Image (cartoon, helix red, strand yellow):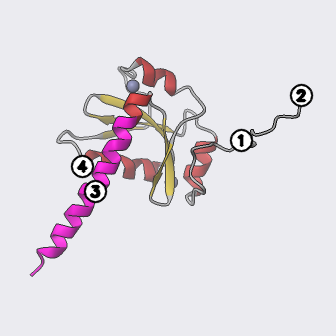
Amino acid sequence: MDAVDFGDPPAAPADGPQSVRCTACDAALRSPGRDTVSFLLIDHLTIPLVGCPDHIEQFGTVCGLTTEESTTILKHRPAGGIQCPGCRRASHRHRHPVVAVGAGAIGVLACPAHQDDVVGRYRAGLRTRHHLTESIASHRP
Ligand SMILES: [Zn+2]
Ligand SMILES: [Zn+2]
């Protein structure tokens, strides 16, 4: 066993958030498994997500602002499975990008293309929500 391994910080995800305040998300990200993975159905995509139910719900709702279709969150693998082979493989990986959602953080277990897609939707959704609340506020009598 060669114990000397410089420049490799112990078990810290390089692109993870500094701190996850939501302990439930934190616990889920530390040990992604059957119980902590949910599936976001958006348009024709099935994106596996890791996090606590609250923050996954929040992520799904914000992503849903970018589409006319309804989005669904499943607690179990959908009957038809995951259509994209890249995403299917990614769901078995242990390292994954983490997106900050409010006080929590969720892992997106998708292939790079669909990761970009869903993270882009989330960012766009946040902007949409911002505009919505602004226009509601400015239209008050
Ligand atoms: Zn959480
Ligand atoms: Zn994919």
Residue at label 4?
A: 65
Residue at label 3?
A: 127
Q: CA distance from mark 4 to mark 2?
A: 51 Å
Q: CA distance from mark 3 to mark 1?
A: 33 Å
Q: Are marks 1 and 2 in contact (CB under 8 Å)?
A: no
In the image, is residue 8 above or below residue 25? above
Q: CA distance from mark 2 to mark 3?
A: 49 Å
Task: Work out whether mark 2 precedes mark 3 in sequence or the reverse, and give the earlier one.
Answer: 2
Q: Identify residue type, mark 3.
A: Arg
Q: Is residue 134 magenta?
A: yes
Which residues make up the magenta segment? 116-141
Q: Residue 63 placed where, x, y %?
A: 31, 46
Image mark for residue 2:
2
Q: CA distance from mark 4 to mark 3?
A: 10 Å
Q: Are marks 1 and 4 in contact (CB under 8 Å)?
A: no
Image mark for residue 11:
1
Q: Quadrant of the C terminus?
A: bottom left
Q: Nearer the viewer, residue 126 or 14?
A: 14
